[in-house]
Image (cartoon, helix red, strand yellow):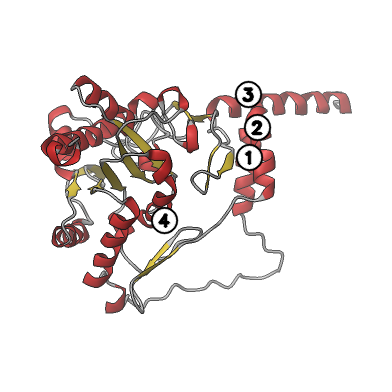
């Protein structure tokens, strides 16, 4: 008759399982990123002096420097003119290393061409254009001279009014166009324990906690009632209006207090339904916003043609990694390079206006 394992065996097995889960999490999961309040810029930023390991998409490590800015040489903002890339996770670029991020690639191109200007990327995953507009003035003193502010649009829908999102600044067209800043500071628990979770490499425990938070438990018996989504189509008042976009562009210029460039990254080319889709499904909105920019004297650059030309020439897509679907997700090394090249070319074409002494 087989003997039943005693408590010691169960405890040993539990300890070994936890050790294995801890080791797997430390190697294969994204790092917990602590944040801190930066009084100089007036915002919570990634904790300077830390590093971020990304594994869920891509396989990279990035460093956090002064004011939470990633990829700064030596961790500090040097003096001299800067091109600032504002945006969300596309600019943050955690999926690629520091040297492959668009701001750093731009800096390298500028140096190799004898231009005394560096790129700086200021971004937070999930941010919208409206968040960048609200954030930009706080960085003005720290950044110094900025010949060009590049507002990167990973989604053209970021320019549409009346689409509020939780914990994000909102842009409304009614009753008059206006922006509502939203402040969602991190909890005291996260501020206190995130550094410890990172130090102890408890990414697995943190991931499990996040998954549990997303669960909705129901203890009542019987079928659950579902709330049907509204079938009402958006009315004309929800469509982008000329006045709303005029206001948005003016607010962007005011926040930047300097030259502005809108840079759009369409989701193309992309693999869909077994083929390669090269058309941008948001092209109508992009063209309309480009027209609004032209009327307001602000440049708008659509990187769709550059993305497609790169794919047709090399067979490589600007998005996707070895551990993610090709053509989808965040920008890979090729994508960041294409963005940097486009901005550098724009600087060269407008050198006299932007880099005049």
Which is nearer the N-term, disc 2 or disc 4?
Answer: 4
**Mark in front: 2 vs 4:** 4
Query: Which image quadrant: the N terminus?
Result: top right
Above or below, 208 relative to 128 = above
Q: Residue furthest top?
A: 112
Relative side of 194 to 99, left or right:
right
Relative side of 13 to 322, left or right:
right
Q: CA distance from mark 2 to mark 3?
A: 9 Å
Q: Which residue is mark 4?
A: 134
Q: For residue 23, which numbered disc appears in the image?
A: 3
Horizontal and vertical percent for residue 354? 19, 40
Q: Residue furthest front?
A: 357
Element class at badge 1? helix
Q: CA distance from mark 3 to mark 4?
A: 40 Å
Q: Do the residues bearing badges 1 and 2 touch, measured as CB atoms within 8 Å?
A: yes
User: Is 357 in front, or is 303?
Assistant: 357
């Amino acid at each position: 008759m087989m003997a039943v394992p005693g408590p010691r065996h169960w405890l040993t097995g539990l300890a070994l399982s936890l050790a294995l889960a801890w080791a797997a999490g430390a190697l294969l999961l994204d790092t917990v990123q602590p944040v801190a309040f930066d009084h100089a810029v007036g915002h919570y930023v990634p904790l300077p002096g830390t590093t971020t390991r990304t594994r869920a998409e891509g396989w990279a490590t990035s460093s956090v420097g002064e004011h939470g800015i990633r990829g700064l040489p030596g961790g500090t903002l040097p003096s001299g003119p800067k091109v600032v890339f504002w945006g969300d996770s596309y600019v943050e670029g955690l999926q690629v290393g520091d040297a492959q991020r668009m701001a750093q690639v731009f800096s390298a191109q500028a140096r190799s061409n004898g231009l005394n200007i560096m790129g700086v990327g200021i971004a937070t995953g999930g941010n919208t254009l409206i968040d960048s507009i609200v954030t930009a003035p706080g960085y003005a003193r720290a950044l110094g001279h900025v010949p060009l502010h590049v507002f990167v649009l990973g989604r053209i829908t970021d320019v549409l009014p009346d689409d509020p999102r939780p914990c994000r600044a909102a842009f409304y067209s009614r009753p008059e166009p206006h922006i509502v800043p939203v402040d969602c500071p991190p909890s005291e628990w996260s501020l206190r324990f995130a550094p410890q979770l990172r130090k102890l490499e408890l990414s697995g425990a943190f991931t499990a906690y996040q998954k549990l938070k997303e669960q909705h438990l129901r203890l009542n018996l019987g079928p659950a009632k579902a709330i049907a989504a509204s079938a009402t189509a958006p009315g004309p008042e929800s469509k982008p209006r000329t006045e709303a976009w005029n206001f948005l562009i003016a607010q962007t210029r005011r926040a930047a207090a300097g030259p502005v460039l809108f840079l759009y990254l369409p989701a193309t080319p992309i693999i869909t339904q077994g083929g390669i889709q090269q058309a941008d499904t948001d092209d109508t909105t992009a063209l309309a916003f480009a027209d609004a920019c032209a009327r307001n004297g602000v440049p708008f650059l659509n990187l769709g043609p550059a993305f497609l030309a790169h794919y047709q020439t090399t067979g490589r897509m600007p998005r996707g990694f070895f551990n993610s679907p090709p053509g989808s997700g965040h920008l890979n090394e090729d994508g960041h390079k294409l963005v940097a090249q486009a901005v550098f070319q724009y600087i060269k074409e407008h050198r006299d206006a932007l880099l005049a002494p």
